[in-house]
Image: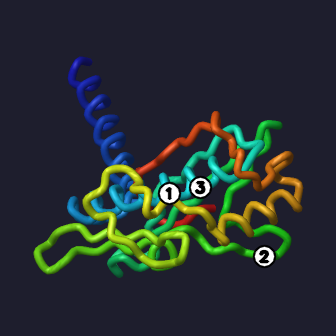
Amino acid sequence: MRRKWVKVISIFLLILSGSYFVFHKLTKPDLGHKTTKLYQHGFRLLEEQNGTYIKAHYTGIDKIEFSPIYVTEEGSTFSNVYIRPTIYDKHGNEATLGTEVKNVISSDIGIVSHIIVDFDGDGNEVIELKDSNGTFIDVSNEQHLPNEVKLTRQPFVDGNIELLVEDGQLIGVVKDDKGSPDAEIVYNTELHKGGAE
């Protein structure tokens, strides 16, 4: 009887570990440690840049929460990697930037359009973020957002929030330099294989 239980437990553990392996293979990108760290560092700065902008320039916001870092074209290094912020208003509504609104599909916040991530000839991280004038600035050695890339305008975000307000997904969110100083920003540097639903 004891041998039977050992077999049952062994089979259960084998199925459990196999399920974990399959889940991990389907949901986690197969990137090297160095590339993973580069994405996490660069996109954490990009999240801070966009979260800080929204918090400083819009009233009526309770929370800004970032999606995982989506890696959709694994194997073609640095090709399609992006994030999407979700905004929660003071009325309990939430809406995600980069989704289709009124038959308009906004672009995602990610590689090339908002951030450049790469390695230099010596294998060091290269991270560049756009400033308010659209010029890429090197922030490779920064752990927090430097002043020169704090945005005073962000047309992509402004247009996207305007659509979400017009569509009724957000209520009471208004562009105003009073901002939402008490709004919480939730960062997310988890990497996820595939795109957002």
Q: Position of residue 86 (x, y in %)?
A: 65, 51
Q: Quadrant of residue 75?
A: bottom left
The answer to whether marks 2 and 1 mark residues whose Cβ atoms lie closer than 8 Å is no
Residue found farthest to the left: 122
Residue 174: numbered disc: none
Q: What amino acid is found at the position of numbered circle 3 in the picture?
A: Tyr
Q: Position of residue 103 (x, y in %)?
A: 82, 75
Residue found farthest to the top: 1
Residue 49: numbered disc: 1
Is 39 on the left or on the right of 156, as rendered? left
> Which one is closest to the eye, mark 2 or mark 3?
3
Residue at 78 percent across and 37 percent down: it is: 90
Q: Provide the secondary structure element on which disc 1 rests.
A: helix
The quarter of the rendered structure image containing the N terminus is top left
> Which sits earlier in the primary sequence, circle 2 or circle 1?
1
Is 195 on the left or on the right of 18, as rendered? right
Q: Position of residue 85 (x, y in %)?
A: 60, 55
Q: What amino acid is found at the position of numbered circle 1 in the picture?
A: Gln
Residue in the foreground of this view, choosing between 13 and 141: 141
Q: Position of residue 176 (x, y in %)?
A: 75, 52
Mark 2 Cα shell of 10 Å, populated few (<14), some (14-19), many (≥20): few
Mark 3 → mark 1, Cα distance in angstroms:
6 Å
Is 31 on the left or on the right of 182, as rendered? left
> Which sits earlier in the primary sequence, circle 2 or circle 3?
3
Q: Provide the secondary structure element on which disc 3 rests.
A: helix
Residue at 36 percent across and 63 percent down: it is: 29
Residue at 33 percent across and 56 percent down: it is: 41
| Residue topped by disc 3 | 53
Mark 2 → mark 1, Cα distance in angstroms:
24 Å
Residue 104: numbered disc: 2
Residue at 62 percent across and 67 percent down: it is: 154
